[in-house]
Amino acid sequence: MMRLRKLEELPFDNTYARLPEAFYARVEPTPLSNPVLVSFNPDAAALLDLDPDEAERPEFAGVFGGRLLIPGSEPVAMIYSGHQFGIYAGQLGDGRAILLGEVTNSRGDKWDLHLKGAGQTPFSRDGDGRAVLRSAIREYLCGEAMHGLGIPTTRSLCIVAGDEAVLRERPEVGAMLLRMAPTHVRFGSFQAFFARRQPEHVKQLADYVIARFYPHLAAADRYPRFFHEVAVRTAQLIAKWQAVGWAHGVMNSDNMSIVGLTLDYGPYGFLDAYDPSFICNHSDHQGRYSFRNQPDIGYFNLRCLGQALSSLVTPQQEQEGLAAYEAAQAAHYLELMRAKLGLQESKPEDGALLNDLLALMAANQVDYTIFFRALGGFKSGRDERNEALRDFFVDRDGFDRWAVRYRDRLRGEAGPDEDRRARMHRINPKYILRNYLAQTAIERARQKDYSEIDRLRQLLADPFTEQPEMDAYAAPPPDWGRQILVSCSS
């Protein structure tokens, strides 16, 4: 039987801190004053074999409020650079986050413990190194929501708040978030050393990442195969974002994980009414990171990574990796969307059937999540009507014409409607983290009522299962909820 551990017993193996100091700066957290535990995630604790009772200890808020260090941790701020809004930004790095160390669980899985909001580092530039409670709540909840949806993501163990005010557009409560991931190495980690003309460090970092996360690539051609696999993982990740209707908001190359995780939650947003031009980031004035642009931005960022790896990967090998990205993204997206429609077989007309539905949804401002969930109830009998689904559309005749095609397509597959509905409900969520739900939790937390954070965390851990007592959380946003502006400030 697995033994749960106390904080002092977490087994660290800090492989990143064994790299040369060109890869990081050693720095300790700047503690919050009077740290208070806002929320604790037992599911994340289980990944560390951490006893959930540890959250009740006063030392817990001290550790994750930056006041105490766990034995074995070796805090460092990681260096990286990247393209921000399409422009190379020079040296960046962990300006308000510190890698405490790497914990190995009983199954051999290794998890970075990354403390966000931990104070200034040598990479803070003009920043204060802090995070605010608002952004910590949004990242904490969305990481768990994405995990519940089956999308690769960072996780979060806890949020700790302090007394001090942090100035953003207005004074806000300062907080720290303990973020977890197998690694926080990103595309921009390689770009930093390419820009410095240090190919030996590019190679050293590539060897480190391959040995840790791509060990099957030990052959002489490991570098082009590494780029190819990163490209495919990135393609599949972005396809999942598109299928669930989620926009990242700041797809800078320094926010792209080298292992294909959703990384750095800022001004993200789930679609309400389907709108391919949806821009979730109020700071994105040109719409570079709109929902529809995400596959193209993934390609751009992989080009940046390919350039950074140019001492290890030939131009031809880079092009092959980029072509693999395009093919994998398109194929995985269509596979996911076919499943959202309840289709099990692949047929040439599926792309047109899907695209025509999405165009109809956009023209009629149909809620993306609610409609696809409801589509599971489509009646495929020739004489049966689908009045409830028609009512999503102002253009009911347009839906009727599409429904005829959809019915014909369904009738070409075996199985009753009930089986199809069950399949569709396993991929079309009922509950997503709409901005207004997160904002409600934030407003209550500002009044020191943290209960809504935990309620949402538990709900979003199981977004596909009907939870009748939580039906209000599956509703479309109220009018005020459609007006929420989210920017890069955190």
Image (spheres, rainbow, N blue to C red):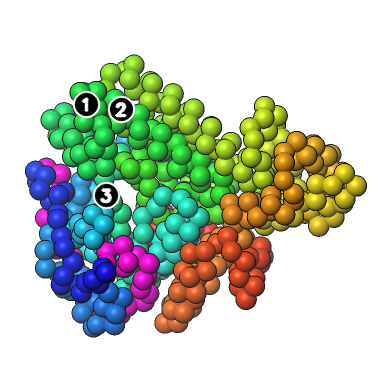
- Apparent side of residue 120 relative to residue 180 in the rendered image (left or right): left
The numbered mark, 3 or 2, whose residue comes first in the sequence reads 3
Picture disc at residue 183:
3
The answer to whether any part of residue 1 appears in the image is yes
Above or below: residue 275 compared with residue 198: below
Above or below, comparing residue 349 to residue 159 in the picture: above
Q: Nearer the viewer, mark 1 or mark 2?
A: 1
Q: Separation of disc 3 and disc 2 at Cα?
A: 19 Å
Question: What residue appears at the point 66 percent right and 66 percent down from the top-left corner?
Answer: 475
The magenta segment: 22-49
| SS for dot 2 | helix
Q: Quadrant of the N terminus?
A: bottom left
Tell whether label 2 touches label 1 (CB within 8 Å): yes
Where does label 2 land, which residue? 225
The C terminus - image quarter: bottom left
Measured as percent of width and height from the top left, residue 168 is found at: 37, 64
Residue at 40% of width from left, 38% of height from top? Answer: 233
Within the magenta stretch, is there residue 86? no
Left or right: residue 151 versus residue 102 is right
Marks 3 & 2, CB-CB < 8 Å contact? no
Q: Count residues near mark 2 (Cα–Cα under 10 Å), then give few for <14, some for 14-19, many for 20+.
A: many
Q: Residue furthest right?
A: 383
**Callout 1: SS:** loop
Residue that numbered label 1 is attached to: 219
